Amino acid sequence: MSTTLPGSDSLLKRIRTVSSIGILLDGYNLSVIAVALVPLTKQFHLDAAATGLLASAMLLGSIVGGLVAGILADRLGRKTLLIWDLVIFMVFSVISAVLFNYTWLVVARFVVGLAVGADYAISPTYLAEFASRETRGYHLGYVWLAWSVGAVMSFGLGAVIVGWLPPALSWRMLFALALIPAAVGLMMRRTLPESPHWLQYGRGRAGNRQPTAKGASHLGRAWRLALVPWFLMDFSTYGLGLLLPLMLKSNGLASTTGAIIGTGLAALFGGVGSAWAMMKLDRAGRIFLQVRGFLLSGMGLWVLAVMLWINFRVFAVLLGGLMVVNLLNGTGPGTTCGIIPAEIFPTPIRATALGVSTAFSRIGAIAGVFLLGFIEVRYGLGAVLAVAGAASLVGSLVSWLWRIESNQSSLPDVLGQAALASQASEP
């Protein structure tokens, strides 16, 4: 099904913009906690467990938000959920910025995560259903580039605000600033139409037949491709990224400001990689970029681990290596893992599939935060990089084994078409 509506080019750009704002807010909020933890650990005297819980609160919320919003978006439509998730986000961003109690702060960040996880399930689904198959990769790549923009914003603002304001005020300002893009996005979303794919094929309409046995097998393969690589990517990138400022500081590799700026530069290079991938997706395809990105970033992390093991601890070299690793990740799984689920599942379960994939990826992120944090305390930063690198290498392998190339393919609209979308990718 091709989407042709009056003024479709301008409409598509608006949809791309509002979808990108939701993912930008995720990049900002999930990264800003890495900055905010520096003053928060001082104000609330947090130990390792309390720090990990606060760092993971939004991730926990996004698991629930992705699951619930995905199901509701497939049943109730895309547009309604797009509006309400931003309303919830704005309310609890304000609340989290004015709290004085650690426990309630964890709760507030959890609810912010609900809204963020919801947007992951809905925004890429909504955009994919308006974009043409010839340029869909570019438009979805634009959305995931926005994540890096949000992350870089958080570190840039964080370096200034944490250095300028007292600790008790700096983290509040960082949380509150997310309201500005959220308000813009909310105003724009109110005027958007419902997805024509969902109107025609959603809620079991138009011959939503059950797949054959072979089709069910291909659908199972689609689930494996959507879930496992994204889990491994988030395990590595979030587990390392959310704790990196504290790790750099605790290992004596940088000052507080230096650790924040260094992590921000690494995030910036991830954005450069995503920008490059955005231009290549509709030519090179999703699987090639994902396999290569996983492989090269995993190898890069292992090189950095070996450098630390032989006690080569020059901050500039380590930072440069992390920047290259993030660049390589951005050219592959950092962009493609969120695109593939939006393209390989049929319309009646597309948002659900993206929500489940989001939830599973965030479980990987939480596992990364706690496991890599424990490894760093017990075995050092070199071991952290080695484990994160191993996860990336496994991601490369499973992406190839379970590959389904959705490049230049029409979106499947009924369950019986899910198998057709994957048959061409069988080894």
Image (cartoon, rainbow, N blue to C red):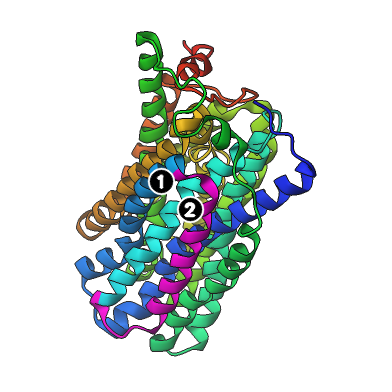
Q: Are marks 1 and 2 in contact (CB under 8 Å)?
A: yes
Q: Closest to the observer: 5 or 141?
A: 5
Looking at the image, residue 48 lies above or below residue 271? below
Residue that label 1 marks: 72
Residue that label 2 marks: 81
Q: Which of the image's four quarters has the N terminus?
A: top right
Q: Earlier in the sequence, mark 1 or mark 2?
A: 1
| Residue 54 magenta-highlighted | no
Q: Secondary structure at mark 1?
A: helix
Residue 24 x %, y %? 56, 58
Whether residue 413 sits left or right of residue 233 in the image: it is right
State the predominant SS element of the stretch in magenta.
Answer: helix
Looking at the image, residue 403 lies above or below residue 233? above
Q: Name the residue rendered at 42%, 57% in the picture.
A: 241
* Residue at the far bottom in the pictured view: 166
Magenta region, residue range? 76-103
Q: Closest to the observer: 409 or 130?
A: 130
Q: Residue 34's image quarter?
A: bottom left
Mark 2 residue type: Leu
Q: Closest to the observer: 390 or 9?
A: 9
Q: Confirm whether residue 97 shows in the render.
A: yes
Q: Residue 168's image quarter?
A: bottom left
Circle 1 Cα neighbour tier, 10 Å, few/some/many (<14 / 14–19 / ≥20): some
Mark 1 residue type: Leu
Q: Closest to the observer: 377 or 146?
A: 146
